[in-house]
Image (cartoon, coloured by chain):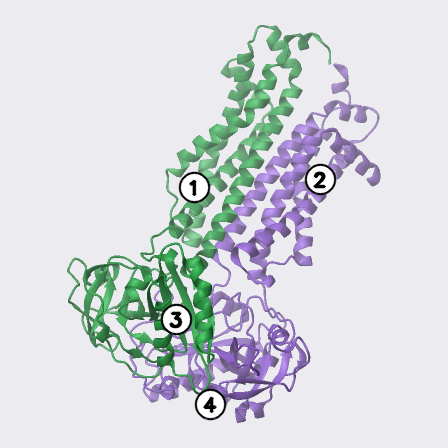
């Protein structure tokens, strides 16, 4: 059968094919837009935090009672932790990167408050802090031990002489110029000198635009809750966590060990929404592709059954099996293509709605041809079995009255 | 006639089991997916206190940096939290019917004997008005009164969960808890209370559970309580003592006022303006006058508690439902039209168009109802899945009666709409046409 008769048969009974084409169009719009969102989320979750997330343990402890001395407690705890075999490095930190809890500040290159300052996440830790997180210093030097002092919530510690900054923050502040050795100014307009540059690390809030901007001050945070960051040798993290919890718990009864967690677990929490969204959308994509494919199979099977006599007649008049097969495949291809054309328009409309209403990123146009190709493949696959059944109708059927 | 139609419908459904199953599956999946996302959206955007949401107001005053607004993207919005000195003074002035300044802190509940271990609990530091303002339900005892606020008495109201943990769920009113070396007396135990969203303080996330315990705001100074919530500051201030911190311009308190009627709103803002005017004369509040109060639903909007993801999912899942309906129409059409001869026969035997039409519609309704029920079950699973993925509190993932009826309603209505065209096509079949050839 040529193209002409097929078209005329499709047009004569146009509602059914039109509905299928519409369904394919909406399916395409949902699948492409969802897939685009999923890939963006996956990309976001897979960003390199610049930290040895897998081998870091984080512990929060909190002292209470009149006899509790926070400085003693911190120094004893850190010594105790370092004495445990397998521990590589440990520090007390003001905040834990990637944890969702942190502090931010802003910096300027000149002491002039009319100039807009650059946002950055801010941390304090001691000379072992970088090692405890597995962060690489690309240039300059780490803090010296004598630069690191205890800092308290309710006492003014002034600004430190030396700070470390990430390359991203250095670039935002100084552009092309080399930031190493330069001064940065805090809100009080007092300066600190950049002594070292970290190639890359993430700060506290994974959804923050300035996630990669980090400034680190030397200091041992003696706050209400003391946060210890501990790096251990690869592979023994889960063994060491209960050991650390037990030893800390036994060593001082005037203190609550709030939790001992892996940084991996803590870092996954802020991404839970992204992960959830990606998983939900994957389920939606699977369901809708499955449903549309099943409906195509169902409808074509039904049509084959309906047209058994017509097929038999064609076969009796000399059509080969392959002709019958081709008829069904081609018919389906025509409907799918019509759906795809409509679908592209709908996809762009939905993408526009998402972009304008929710400020999502603009849809990458390459998703469109890719989607159409996949659609062709899937819908052809769905119709293969019914078409094969049609092809196997024997010519003799034509001679029987049903 | 109806029961006869239902019988015919069931018979016809049995004749094409695969088609019928496909149709039911299409509707069930469509309803399941769209109800899951709609329920999350509905609960996120729900009014947590409908009876009072228009007389409870969150207070904001623009105490940010002279040169820049707090939010670059929303320059008209004042910061969402207050400085301690302002919050304390506003409570003392007490212009509204009720008011509370509050923040979240954490305290260690010390063990009463050697065998127990101390535990850390979240505490909301607030005034006695809190409980009446937010209609907090009690199982035992009550909140504290004004004299306890004035005298900074160590009283505590605990949540049902904390009462389970500490006192095994017994009536614990009058029991003592030691925190910061002070013996607190339990004044009351709160019954199950799940304001969704947690409107009275959405700063740390709007869908958190309520606090473990509540203590008087006047204890802040006495016990030097720190905030465990967010703390914003723009000014470089030298802070050398707890008192310095309280007197600083740092913003870390939430403030709610209850007014007698929504009409008193302008009057209250005028009161704030007058207060800020005074402060301006003292050299504070250097930004242009920008005080605003928000009722509960406006406050939820300020904090954008309905996430964009939830909205995107509702949009996409209704497109999904559309696909399911298109499938159903296509399947029904094919099925009905494929039954031409039977319909012709019924028409020839005297069935009117109306009767044929009704029969088809009843069949569609049966399919829609079945699909809707299964869809509801799927939505139940879907919500469990969301709870697992997001670790959401139970309040955010439960199907209530409204949503159940909505689901069945949408299922039946949409499948009826889907069935209209096919049914119309069928009843147009002339009585004898199909009988001739056979």
The correct choice, above or below, for A81 with respect to A345 in the image is: below
Where does label 4 land, which residue?
B222
Chain letter for the residue marked with disc 3 in the picture? A
Residue at 35% across / 72% down in the picture? A78
| Image x and y of residue B57, in percent | 52, 76
Q: CA distance from mark 3 to mark 4?
A: 26 Å
Q: Answer with the quarter of the image where residue B402 lies.
A: bottom right
Which of the marked residues, 1 or 3, is nearer the chain's N terminus?
3
Q: Colour of chain A?
A: green
Q: What is the number of the mark on residue A200?
A: none
Chain letter for the residue marked with disc 4 in the picture? B
Chain letter for the residue marked with disc 2 in the picture? B
| Image x and y of residue B382, in percent | 59, 50
Q: CA distance from mark 4 to mark 2?
A: 68 Å
Q: Secondary structure at mark 2?
A: helix
Tell us which disc is closer to us: 2 or 1: 2
Where does label 3 land, which residue?
A227
Q: Answer with the quarter of the image where residue B113 lies.
A: bottom right
Total tally of numbered discs in the picture: 4
Where does label 2 land, which residue?
B367
Q: CA distance from mark 2 to mark 3?
A: 59 Å
Q: CA distance from mark 1 to mark 4?
A: 61 Å
- Specify whether residue A335 is in view: no
């Amino acid at each position: 059968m040529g193209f002409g008769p097929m078209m005329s048969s499709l047009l004569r009974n146009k509602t059914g094919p039109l509905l299928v084409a519409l369904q394919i169009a909406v399916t395409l719009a949902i699948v492409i837009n969802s897939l685009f969102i999923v890939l963006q989320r996956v990309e976001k979750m897979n960003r390199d935090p610049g930290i040895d997330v897998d081998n870091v343990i984080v512990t929060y402890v909190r002292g209470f009672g009149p006899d509790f001395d926070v400085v003693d407690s911190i120094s004893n705890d850190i010594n105790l932790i370092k004495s445990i075999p397998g521990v590589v490095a440990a520090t007390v930190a003001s905040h834990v990167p990637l944890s969702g809890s942190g502090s931010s500040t802003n910096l300027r290159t000149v002491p002039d408050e009319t100039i807009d300052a650059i946002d950055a996440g801010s941390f304090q830790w001691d000379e072992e802090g970088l090692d405890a997180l597995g962060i690489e210093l690309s240039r300059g030097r780490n803090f010296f031990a004598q630069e690191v002092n205890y800092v308290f919530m309710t006492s003014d510690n002034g600004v430190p002489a030396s700070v470390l900054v990430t390359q991203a923050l250095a670039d935002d502040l100084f552009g092309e110029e080399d930031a190493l050795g330069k001064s940065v100014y805090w809100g009080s307009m007092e300066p600190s000198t950049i002594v070292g540059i970290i190639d890359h690390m993430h700060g506290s809030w994974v959804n923050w635009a300035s996630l990669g901007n980090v400034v680190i001050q030397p200091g041992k945070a003696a706050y209400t809750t003391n946060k210890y960051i501990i790096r251990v040798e690869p592979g023994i993290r889960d063994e060491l966590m209960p050991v650390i919890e037990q030893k800390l718990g036994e060593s001082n009864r005037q203190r609550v060990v709030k939790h001992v967690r892996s940084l991996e677990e803590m870092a996954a929490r802020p991404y839970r929404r992204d992960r959830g969204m990606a998983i939900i959308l994957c389920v939606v994509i699977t369901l809708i592709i499955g449903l549309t494919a099943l409906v195509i199979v169902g409808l074509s099977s039904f049509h084959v059954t309906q047209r058994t006599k017509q097929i038999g007649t064609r076969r009796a008049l000399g059509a080969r099996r392959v002709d019958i097969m081709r008829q069904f495949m081609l018919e389906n291809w025509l409907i799918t293509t019509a759906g795809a054309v409509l679908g592209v328009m709908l996809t762009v409309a939905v993408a526009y709605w998402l972009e304008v209403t929710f400020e999502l990123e603009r849809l990458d146009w390459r998703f469109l041809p890719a989607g159409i190709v996949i659609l062709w493949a899937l819908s052809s696959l769905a119709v293969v079995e019914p078409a094969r059944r049609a092809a196997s109708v024997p010519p003799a059927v034509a001679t029987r009255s049903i | 006639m109806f029961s006869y139609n239902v019988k015919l419908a069931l018979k016809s459904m049995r004749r094409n089991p695969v088609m019928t199953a496909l149709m039911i599956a299409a509707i069930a999946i469509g309803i399941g997916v769209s109800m899951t996302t709609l329920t999350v959206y509905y609960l996120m955007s729900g009014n947590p206190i409908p009876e009072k949401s228009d007389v409870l107001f969150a207070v904001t005053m623009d105490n940010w940096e002279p040169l820049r607004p707090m939010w670059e993207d929303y320059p008209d919005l004042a910061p969402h939290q207050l400085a301690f000195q302002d919050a304390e003074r506003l409570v003392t002035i007490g212009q509204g019917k009720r008011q509370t300044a509050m923040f979240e802190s954490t305290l260690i509940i010390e063990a009463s004997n050697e065998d127990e271990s101390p535990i850390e609990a979240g505490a909301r530091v607030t005034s006695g008005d809190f409980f009446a303002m937010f209609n907090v339900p009690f199982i035992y005892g009550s909140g504290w009164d004004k004299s306890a606020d004035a005298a900074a008495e160590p009283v505590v109201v605990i949540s049902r969960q904390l009462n389970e943990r500490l006192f095994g769920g017994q009536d614990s009113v009058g029991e003592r808890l030691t925190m910061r070396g002070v013996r607190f007396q339990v004044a009351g135990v709160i019954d199950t209370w799940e304001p969704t969203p947690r409107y009275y303080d959405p700063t740390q996330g709007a869908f958190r559970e309520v606090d473990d315990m509540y203590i008087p705001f006047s204890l802040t100074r006495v016990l030097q309580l720190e905030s465990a919530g967010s703390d914003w500051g723009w000014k470089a201030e030298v802070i050398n003592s707890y008192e310095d911190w309280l007197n600083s311009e740092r913003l870390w308190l939430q403030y709610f006022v209850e007014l007698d009627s929504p009409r008193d709103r302008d009057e209250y803002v005028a009161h704030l303006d007058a207060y800020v005017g005074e402060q301006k004369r003292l050299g504070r509040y250097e930004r242009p006058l920008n005080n605003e109060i928000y009722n509960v639903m406006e406050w939820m909007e300020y904090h954008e508690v309905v996430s964009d993801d939830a909205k995107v999912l509702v949009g996409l899942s209704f497109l999904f439902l559309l696909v399911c309906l298109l499938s159903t129409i296509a399947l029904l059409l094919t099925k009905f039209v494929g039954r031409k001869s039977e319909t012709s026969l019924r028409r020839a035997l005297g069935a009117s168009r109306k009767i044929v039409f009704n029969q088809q519609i009843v069949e569609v309704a049966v399919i829609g109802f079945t699909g809707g029920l299964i869809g509801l079950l799927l939505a139940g699973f879907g919500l469990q899945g969301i709870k697992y993925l997001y670790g959401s509190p139970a309040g955010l993932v439960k199907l209530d009666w409204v949503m159940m009826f909505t689901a069945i309603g949408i299922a039946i209505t949409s499948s009826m709409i889907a069935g209209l065209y096919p049914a119309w096509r069928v009843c147009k079949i002339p009585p004898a046409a199909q009988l001739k050839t056979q």
